[in-house]
Amino acid sequence: MIVRLVCEAEEFDFEVNSDWNILFLKQRACQLFSVDFDAYSVYLNQERLNEDRKISTCSFAEGCRIELIKRQLRNKYFVYCYVCEVVSPSLVSFICDGCGFSEFIPSVVSDITRTACGKCCHNGCQSHSATVKFICMKSADHQPTVMLRHIRRNLELIPCVACCNQHFEVLVSFCQKKSHALCLECFKSYSKEYLESGQFQLVADLGFTLGCPAGCLDSFISDPHHFRILGKEFYSRYKDFSASRYIQMQDCVVCPVCGQIWNTFDESHSPTVNTRLPSRSQWYTCKPPMGCGSLFCAACLWHFTGIESDSTVCRCDSTSSERFTHPSVLSRFWNVWRMVSVTSEERDNQEIIAKVSRPCPRCRSATEKAGGCNHIHCSVCGIDWCWVCCEPWTGDCQALHWL
């Protein structure tokens, strides 16, 4: 097959073999044009060709134009710029630890510790260490910036593991395998879906984060700044989710009025809990002086502060009238609480919820099972529990209650 090789202002007709790969064609073409092999890429119809592909798998035709185009110098690092509020290409500056100037020539650079070894050229400075500073390419005045170590340029045309498109400039990598990477749009979708379903994982020293989409062990997003690229609203939801999930995992409750956190197992500082109330909810009093004195339900965040207009009904409770007349309700709320009325529609809704749902053994969230096995994963607190015995999932549940 005869093709037309083009490099800048020169053109040649050249015979190619369909068994060649693009890398071999590039070597032959660079020899023909006497240009640097590492400085050029091969293009067909304005599309860069992967050098591992065979010519037989490409859309070569008799007389087609194959172009050698010089690669542009491209940066390696990316930052999240708080001013631009987007992922931005980064310039790298080396600030001497001795004199504080940027006239430092590095010899060894560590991406992990963001330090460099080398030689400072400023006025005879003898320092041999420097700090690596990542700067937004749009302006050096844009501060602060955070280097995003999981975002890299897609120089090898690796396809996104989700959408399989290989023509993305940058990818988000999770592990050592280059193919286990997502484009930015798929990373955003991945993050949103997992946050909405409560599947972010708590990892020691990292907090709540996402793992490799291919399931690789010990491969996680190590810096939560990567979630800032989804916008302020998502990042705010992510922080709220992380805080509330951690509190629930530590068997704590939060007063919905003042935000005071209570450890339910610390008797000296725990809120007053009404354990005898025949209800599926968790009722607490936020004890003064540390708390505000409100009566609240930790499951549905119902709260009562003693003001009549504040008397919203606890949404997760049963509809039994016993909860309004039971003597163990805290006495200082009793006179107002006994007068709270429930509409017929609210009663119907509560009865349906009580019939079709069961409470999570940790956070008491009402849970409905629509088919499947009896192994339940709570999307609120993250615990795995058994639908049959309503206890945390164990090997006995796996053997006796799975189906």
Image: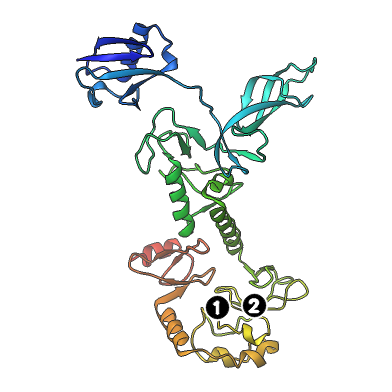
Q: How far is the residue under mark 2 from the one under mark 1?
A: 10 Å
Q: How is the image coloured?
A: rainbow
Q: Is residue 30 above or below residue 96?
A: above
Q: Is residue 254 above or below residue 118?
A: below
Amino acid bearing label 1: Ser
Question: Considering the image in quadrants, where does the N terminus appear?
Answer: top left
Q: Is residue 36 above or below residue 221?
A: above
Q: Residue at x 42, y 86 (%)?
A: 348
Q: How many marks?
A: 2
**Which residue carries the number 1 mark?**
281
Is 82 left, or right, of 73 in this rendering? Answer: right
Q: Which mark is residue 56?
A: none
Q: Secondary structure at mark 2?
A: strand
- Which percent across, then down, holds residue 216? 44, 42
Q: Which mark is residue 284?
A: 2
In the rendered image, which quarter is residue 122 located in? top right
| Mark 2 crowdedness (10 Å alpha carbons): few <14, some 14-19, many ≥20 | many
Q: Residue at x 25, y 26 (%)?
A: 58
In the rendered image, which quarter is residue 155 located in? top left
Q: Is residue 64 above or below residue 145?
A: above
- Which percent across, then down, holds residue 358? 44, 74
The foreground one among 267 and 371 is 371
Q: Secondary structure at mark 1?
A: loop
Amino acid bearing label 2: Tyr
| Mark 1 crowdedness (10 Å alpha carbons): few <14, some 14-19, many ≥20 | many
- Which percent across, then down, holds residue 187? 45, 45
Is 290 left, or right, of 347 in this rendering? Answer: right
Q: Residue at x 34, y 7 (%)?
A: 32
